């Protein structure tokens, strides 16, 4: 396997790659997920899930933002890291398939209608785009033995910081990292990833051979070819004095294959303060020069150029942040790599992203003659080949907050619960597998609560045929649906016209687990009688004793021979109370 690669332009200094594998910038990938990017530099990758930020209250958003600032401040100048946000199409289109097969019974017409509805909703959603988030960090080390314990310690710290934010995270092993790289270099999700570590011994190929595309072509100045797909690498020029946390959110919401990458390098705190003080000295020197010009020209020396005044204020504020607030200095490289099946689609996607950037007073600039460096820098390897950096403080960097909204998308026998209003993805869940399986439908009158409940009933009936569905229907609005689904309708009424009665004395010997079922039933009858007798004080202690004694007496024949026809009823309790000698027993019997 030796896919072709073309490379030209000043960015490669005249060197031409002989194979596509040589374009992939790493030396060795190990089974435990450690990658030797180059001699003396090792990286590791952590995948993390989303949390609810966009829909959170202002107080919760501030808390998450402060936590993210503390997360960024953890990294020192010897620990560069890369934030990667990958939008790629899943193999076979939408992630979710309708798993309600026809059963060739009386309910196939309902199945067909429900399946058509689900297919329409899934087609409307963005589930064809899978959004993944990774953080890749690296440490300089003389060898693997030195790098491994350092990376393990940093991994534990980063996962602990994610846990504080409420985000689940996990370290990727070597095969998982290769699968991510394969997905980046095989857009469209058409080619499955086939790799196992024994394959290296059997075939004699390296790990790059299993992930390299058919070809690379970097001969053009503003685009590149990735097999049959077109690509474009750009960087974000940040010109805004104040940024919004919506910028990254809007970029990642696009229905396009793309990789947004933030390479972050922390500047040593003392070096950052010294550099800022040097800039302030330079600005003061420029002020003196302007004042000398003013004196020689004969006008007021306090009149200074507006830009000079602005720079002076900004530099003073930056120095104050670095010295008195919990702020650090970062060097940020923000790149965007778009992938599309046609050049026209690629240009449309880039144009859309450029419009979003302009809305937030930024600019998306194409990496002319640096397409190869831009693409390799977007790979989840932690290697930055782009030397375009923007100095930013902790809070300015943290404004690119990587959280949107937590998706609820379970595989298997999951039920449809509607559409996520923010991500436009379908909500598929099995509440029995959640931490709290209970659910409520809340809404204003006429908002569709009953319809949502009926839809879930139908969904459970079609998807989970072994589950029981029990409906308490005081208003009688569900019995037509139950009749259509072949269920049983039990009519309860204070009058005898309903023809159905409830026996409060009914007992099941198995429902008490490890406790005595007779004691639980006695407690229930005591509560029932207390409601019937009423009054401010309820039952007297003597009355409770009498009731408990009577209950145990009338259940004795049934427990000796548990036949259904021997089950006690309230009439038996009434008769037993009348047999007692205590006057309190007659009072309870009269109340019954």
Image: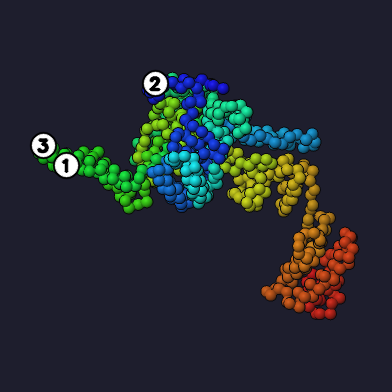
Q: Where's residue 195, x and y in %?
A: 61, 31
Q: How far is the residue under mark 3 from the one under mark 1?
A: 14 Å
- Disc 2 is placed on an element classified as loop
Which image quarter: residue 1? top right
- Disc 3 is placed on an element classified as helix
Q: How is the image coloured?
A: rainbow
Q: Which mark is residue 14?
A: 2
Viewer-nearest of discs 3 and 1: 1
Q: Where's residue 332, x and y in %?
A: 39, 38
Q: Residue at x 79, y 62 (%)?
A: 504
Specify which label sits upstream in the sequence, 2 or 3: 2
- Disc 1 is placed on an element classified as helix
Q: Residue at x 50, y 24 (%)?
A: 20
Q: Nearer the viewer, residue 395 or 72?
A: 72
At label 2, counting other C-alpha atoms closer than 10 Å, the crowd grade (few under 14, some 14-19, many 20 or more) is: few
At label 1, counting other C-alpha atoms closer than 10 Å, the crowd grade (few under 14, some 14-19, many 20 or more) is: some
Q: Where's residue 280, x and y in %?
A: 24, 44
Left or right, 304 with reference to 144: left
Which image quarter: residue 263? top left
Name the residue beneath numbered marker 1.
Answer: 288
Viewer-nearest of discs 2 and 1: 2
Name the residue beneath numbered marker 3.
Answer: 297
Left or right, 427 with reference to 386: right
């Amino acid at each position: 396997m030796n896919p072709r690669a073309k490379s030209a332009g000043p960015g490669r200094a005249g060197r031409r790659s002989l194979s596509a594998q040589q374009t992939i910038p790493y030396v060795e990938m190990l089974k435990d997920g450690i990658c030797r990017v180059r001699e003396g530099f090792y990286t590791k990758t952590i995948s993390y899930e989303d949390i609810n930020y966009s829909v959170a209250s202002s107080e919760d958003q501030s808390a998450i933002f402060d936590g993210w600032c503390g997360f960024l401040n953890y990294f020192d100048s010897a620990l560069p890291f890369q934030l990667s946000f990958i939008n790629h199409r899943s193999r076979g289109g939408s992630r979710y398939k309708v798993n309600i097969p026809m059963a060739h019974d009386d309910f196939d017409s309902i199945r067909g209608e429900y399946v058509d509805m689900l297919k329409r909703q899934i087609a409307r959603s963005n589930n064809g785009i899978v959004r993944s988030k990774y953080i890749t960090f690296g440490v300089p080390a003389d060898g693997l033995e030195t790098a491994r314990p350092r990376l393990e310690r940093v991994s534990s710290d980063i996962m602990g910081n994610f846990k504080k934010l409420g985000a689940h995270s996990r370290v990727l092993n070597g095969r998982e990292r290769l699968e991510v790289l394969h997905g980046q270099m095989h857009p469209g999700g058409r080619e499955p990833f086939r790799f196992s570590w024994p394959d290296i011994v059997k075939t004699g190929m390296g790990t790059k051979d299993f992930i390299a595309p058919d070809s690379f072509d970097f001969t053009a100045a503003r685009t590149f070819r990735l097999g049959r797909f077109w690509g474009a690498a750009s960087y974000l020029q940040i010109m805004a004095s104040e940024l919004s946390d919506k910028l990254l959110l809007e970029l990642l919401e696009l229905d396009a294959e793309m990789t947004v990458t933030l390479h972050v390098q922390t500047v040593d705190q003392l070096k950052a303060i010294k550099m800022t003080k040097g800039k302030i000295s330079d600005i003061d020197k420029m002020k003196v020069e302007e004042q000398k010009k003013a004196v020689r020209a004969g006008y007021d020396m306090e009149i200074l150029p507006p830009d000079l005044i602005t720079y002076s204020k900004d530099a003073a504020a930056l120095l104050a942040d670095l010295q008195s607030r919990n702020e650090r200095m970062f060097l940020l490289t923000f790149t965007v790599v778009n992938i599309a099946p046609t050049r026209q689609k690629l240009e449309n996607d880039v144009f859309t992203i450029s419009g979003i950037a302009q809305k937030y007073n930024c600019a998306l600039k194409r990496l002319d003659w640096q397409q190869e460096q831009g693409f390799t820098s977007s790979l989840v390897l932690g290697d930055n080949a782009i030397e375009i950096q923007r100095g930013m403080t902790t809070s300015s960097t943290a404004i690119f907050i990587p959280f949107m909204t937590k998706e609820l998308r379970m595989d298997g026998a999951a039920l449809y619960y509607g559409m996520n209003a923010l991500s436009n993805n379908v909500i598929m869940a099995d509440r029995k597998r959640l931490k709290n399986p209970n659910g409520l439908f809340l809404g204003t009158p006429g908002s569709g609560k009953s319809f949502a409940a009926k839809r879930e009933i139908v969904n459970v009936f079609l998807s989970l045929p072994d589950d029981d569905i029990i409906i308490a229907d005081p208003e009688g609005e569900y019995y037509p649906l139950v009749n259509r689904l072949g269920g049983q309708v039990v009519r309860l009424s204070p009058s005898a016209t309903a023809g159905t009665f409830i026996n409060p004395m009914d007992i099941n010997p198995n429902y008490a687990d490890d406790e005595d079922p007779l004691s639980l039933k006695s407690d229930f009858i005591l509560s029932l009688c207390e409601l019937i007798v009423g009054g401010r004080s309820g039952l007297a202690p003597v009355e409770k004793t009498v009731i408990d004694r009577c209950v145990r007496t009338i259940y004795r024949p049934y427990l000796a021979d548990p036949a259904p026809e021997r089950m006690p009823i309230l009439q038996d309790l009434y008769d037993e109370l009348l047999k007692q000698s205590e006057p309190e027993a007659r009072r309870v019997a009269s109340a019954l």
